[in-house]
Image (cartoon, grey):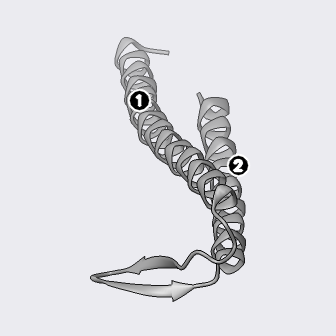
Amino acid sequence: MSDPDVKKAIESHRQKTVMANQQISVINSQIESLNIKFRRSQLIESELVTLPEDVATYKACGRMFIKKARETLIEDIKKDRDKITDSIEISQKARDTVNKEL
């Protein structure tokens, strides 16, 4: 191999490494954001569980609030948390894939 070929290969590898590191940074940010949402949903659920059953509960919908049963809100939170968990797993797999490509 000649000197220019080696330089091209090194530069190509450097560019791939930089791009991979940027992708990993973005994915890590997404995972952290999802973890915050997950912890927030746990906190909200724990607060809802402590409320008496006859208390009126509302869900924010844009500028409005919709009255919902406490049990329905808890079920919705659990469904959202399942989606968040799936998204975290997908993001972690994507991060692992990017790491393997390096």
Foreground: 82 or 29?
82
Foreground: 99 or 25?
25
Would you name the residue on which mark 2 appears? 89
Q: Quadrant of the C terminus?
A: top right
Q: Where is residue 66 drawn, in percent x and y?
A: 45, 87
Q: Name the residue rendered at 72%, 76% in the picture.
A: 71
Would you name the residue on which mark 1 appears? 12
Q: Name the residue rendered at 60%, 39% in the picture.
A: 95
Does residue 74 lie above or below 69 as drawn? above
Foreground: 49 or 14?
49
Q: Where is residue 3 drawn, in percent x and y?
A: 37, 12
Amino acid found under the numbered disc labelled 2 = Glu
Amino acid found under the numbered disc labelled 1 = Ser
| Dot 1 crowding, Cα within 10 Å, few <14, some 14–19, many 20+ | few
Identify the secondary structure beneath mark 2: helix
Q: Where is residue 81 drawn, in percent x and y?
A: 66, 59
Does residue 22 lie above or below 73 as drawn? above
Distance from disc 2 to disc 1, alpha carbons, whole Å, reads 30 Å
Q: Name the residue rendered at 72%, 73% in the picture.
A: 75
Foreground: 31 or 72?
72
Q: Quadrant of residue 10?
A: top left
